[in-house]
Image: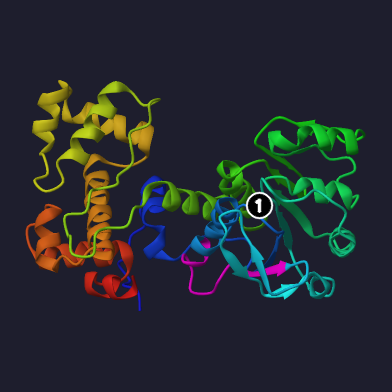
Amino acid sequence: MTDSRRRDFTPSMKLRNQRLLQDVDCPRAGPLNVAFILLEHFSMPAFTTALDALVTANLLREMPFYRMQTYGVTGGSVRSDLGIDIMVGGELAELLHAQVDLVVVCGGYRVRLETLPTLNEALRRAAQHDCRLGSLWNGSYFLAEAGVMEGHTCTIHPENVALFSETFPQLELSCAPLVVEGARFTSASAGSALDMMLEAMRQRLGDDLARSVEEILACDRPAQPCAWHVEQQLPVPDSHLPEALRTILTLMSSNLEEPLSMSEMSRYVTLSRRQIERLFTRHLDTTPSRHYLELRLTRARQLLTQGNASITEVTLACGFVSTTHFSHCFRDYFGMSPSRARQRS
């Protein structure tokens, strides 16, 4: 049960801690069904990057946002570009009767660009039922082959541009790594696969969830099993902020174990306490003390959930005067005790 005194993190720091908070604002309950069609020699990095976005989203709430299913042309196993065989959950014929929100065709460098009648039928049926369609690497070739890209710009891996242009001269092809147009999403490489899934996530579930997933995948790093002194992963000050404010934010991030006083920071940037408070209010919509506390709690969350430090060690590493004070602050923001947070992780 959450504490009645629970406080909300300021928006930027809430994103950093969303994994434990598990209270993402979302316009619909879900879960949404996503089908990945794996073609022989599909790009494993592109597929796993796209899949990771959905798996990570599911970590942010007890009820999953997504259900994922994999399909192959004939079922059984499909060989990836890395030579690793992946067992799929079903064959394309089964997809014809499935209720799906998004279908993603997973291509790859050595995927043969050919006509696959069952795939064409599955994609056409999905389009007729207002299903969203996406592709990875050269998967857009198969979307075009099925006739579901009329009126849409798309992209494809550079190696396949010549064949695509010759085969589908009526379609507009972009050189961008990612093209999103309404219910069509095409990605040209593993590097843009994450962005594609984040855009698909924004459409259905909102920007809050997509930004939270992006923060986790871009910033969080696993700790060594026996190490408690995890390298802190805290936000880099926005380059558009005033230089004095960026300096203060860097000072705070660099001094979590022994927090600086306002007078110390004031002397360092040659600004008065009131001037510093105005900077935080105007640009971050918070106070210096609250931001500093949230930074320390963020680091505490990382240490608790990524390592095996004791509560006392975390207390000292994050600049709290006692374990009691630390536990109270942690509960106020996360709605649970530090020990409970570790168990949930």
Q: Percent from the top left, x then y, of residue 91?
A: 76, 73
Work out whether residue 32 or residue 195 is closer to the camera in this orientation and state it: 195
Residue position marked by numbered label 1 in the rendering: 200
Q: Is residue 210 above or below residue 19?
A: above
Q: Quadrant of residue 282?
A: top left
All told, the count of numbered labels is 1
Residue occupying image coordinates x 35% and y 53%? 9
Type of amino acid under label 1: Ala
Which residue is pictured at 33% across the width and 70% down the height?
Answer: 345
Whether residue 221 is situated above or below residue 29 in the rendered picture: above
Q: Is residue 2 above or below residue 263?
A: below
Q: Height in image: 274 above or below 118?
A: above
> In front: 14, or 214?
214
Which residue lies at the image location 78% right of the left edge and 66% below the top edge? Answer: 73
Q: Residue at x 23, y 63 (%)?
A: 307
Decide if residue 157 is on the left or right side of residue 331. right
Residue at the far front: name it: 83
Q: Start and end of the magenta stretch?
A: 57-71
- Picture coordinates of residue 254, whole percent (x, y): 18, 39
Quadrant showing the N terminus: bottom left
The answer to whether residue 128 is magenta is: no
Q: Could you tell me if residue 30 is visible in this image? A: no
Q: Residues within 10 Å of mark 1 (few under 14, many from 20)?
A: many
Pick the front one: 291 or 95: 95
Could you say where residue 51 lies in the image, as x and y percent from the top left? Answer: 57, 60
**Left or right relative to 241: residue 206:** right
**Badge 1 element:** helix
Residue 259 appears in the figure: yes
In this picture, residue 67 sits left or right of residue 169: left
